[in-house]
Image: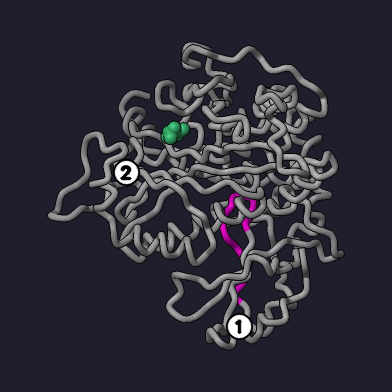
Amino acid sequence: MSHTPPAHLAADFAAQGVSDVECVFPDVSGHPRGKLMPADAFARGAELRIAQAIPMQCVTGDYSYDPIFPDQDPDVLLVPDYATVRAVPWASVPRALAIHDCHELTGELCQFAPRTILRDVMARYERHGLRPVVAPEIEFYLTAPCDDPSQPLRAPPMRGGRVEAGQSAFSLDTLNEHAAFWDEFRAALQALGIRADTWIHEVGLTQFEINLLHDDPLVVADQAFLFKVAAKEIALKHGMNAVFMAKPIAHQPGSSMHLHQSLVDADGRNVFSNADGGESALFRQYIAGLQANLPSLMLLFAPFVNSYRRFVKGSQAPVNFHWGYDNRTAGLRIPRSGAAARRVENRVAGADANPYLVIAATLAAGLDGIERALPPTDAMNDSAYESAHTLPRTLPAALQAFTGDDVARRLFGERFVRAYAAVKDVEHESWLAEIGAWERRFLVAQA
Ligand SMILES: NC(=O)CC[C@H](N)C(=O)O
């Protein structure tokens, strides 16, 4: 992490005609926040408040979460990570963006910022001489413009006035329907240095999935963060919305952010495999760590009230924390692979989750299993849908699990846990303040 601008940066900006830089950081929801700064001044850093909830309320006032926000309106200093400077592909004038780390005004990294949380987990691995390698699969829907939020989302129109219908999983035809969007999106990803692998039409109507190539966790988290920003920006240019809600449309599949993980040693050898190619003890301990800790960390994988609608039996979304070989009904799947690519897939996280926190929480949970040499359950060879639904069913249940035991505190510290829970509490209160369609449909007549 270098705080000194590269020598060529000013000349590069001048040559490209860049006059402004988006100083962006991912907030706890993975939403891009920051300030637009003049290119010749952005290195001095921007100051702003960090504790934002999604309905654009600051976490202040009625919530007394001292000593996290002692002045109820704290500023942090944004410090650019110069390795992340890129041209903004969707801007109408030459403009750059840089992902920033959040520092307290006293200098240290802010313990509430998702990038800090991930950096801390990676430092823990480094002390063990290990390096995690991760790859996410990101699902999302393309929809028509959402001009009336009280109405269900609709599929975008196709050529000839048709609308997508029926079963289009893996249909290349339907993928080609929105070719102008895909071409511009693909070019944007390339310009942002995002290494996308396969692109498919998923099971849902106008639902798609794109896999990112495996890499260093912070690099991949930055890519997944910008992937979502880019998809939304480019879709808007084409009169559509790219929607990353976990369950945007009733009776359609939800959208996930599956995370593949493996660990390598200093020589780049996958430590989930022994020299003879078999599973290592560490592999099983890592799985056990996920099984032991994920139930308490659900708030990070399913951060909104909507997230919990996704966990439906039979939908390929998990309902419990079983693990199994190539078992897509289980929360933890071991994909078929050779010894060098042996890995675990966390299928719990939704597309709505913050990729930094999904990666940090998964890796921290697994390392804890290794450090405590935990044993996993037996592998699940049958459908995990035959077993009980043990994932928390609601946001309040997940909030209770997150704050109710010492797992999250032990892995991420008191400050993060209290602040994150405060933000989720504000969002939940805001949701409770609205009356939904189900309540009107049934309770007007029947209550
Ligand atoms: N690609 C898949 O396996 C489908 C995942 C499913 N859409 C989910 O929400 O979990």
Residue at 55% in and 20% down: 324
Amino acid of disc 2: Pro
Q: Which residues are magenta?
A: 26-36
Mark 1 vs mark 2, CA separation in Å: 46 Å
Q: Is residue 146 magenta?
A: no
The residue closer to the viewer here, 326 or 384, is 326
Q: Earlier in the sequence, mark 1 or mark 2?
A: 1
Residue at 71% in and 43% down: 268
Q: Which mark is residue 125?
A: none
Coordinates of residue 215 in the picture (x, y in percent): 62, 49
Vertical placement of residue 383 versus 369, above or below: above
Q: Nearer the viewer, mark 1 or mark 2?
A: 1
Vertical placement of residue 103 versus 375, above or below: below
Tag 1, which secondary structure?
helix
Coordinates of residue 162 in the picture (x, y in percent): 15, 49
Vertical placement of residue 315 versus 361, above or below: above
Q: Residues within 10 Å of mark 2 (few under 14, many from 20)?
A: few
Q: Quadrant of residue 401?
A: top right
Vertical placement of residue 303 versus 219, above or below: above
Ligand 1, seen in the image, is in the quarter at top left
The residue closer to the viewer here, 337 or 10, is 337
What is the basis of the colouring in this image?
one colour
Residue 42 visible here: yes
Q: Is residue 33 magenta?
A: yes
Quarter of the image with the C terminus is top left
The residue closer to the viewer here, 77 or 434, is 77
Q: Which residue is mark 1?
A: 12
Q: Report the number of discs.
A: 2
Amino acid of disc 1: Asp
Q: Which residue is mark 2?
A: 152
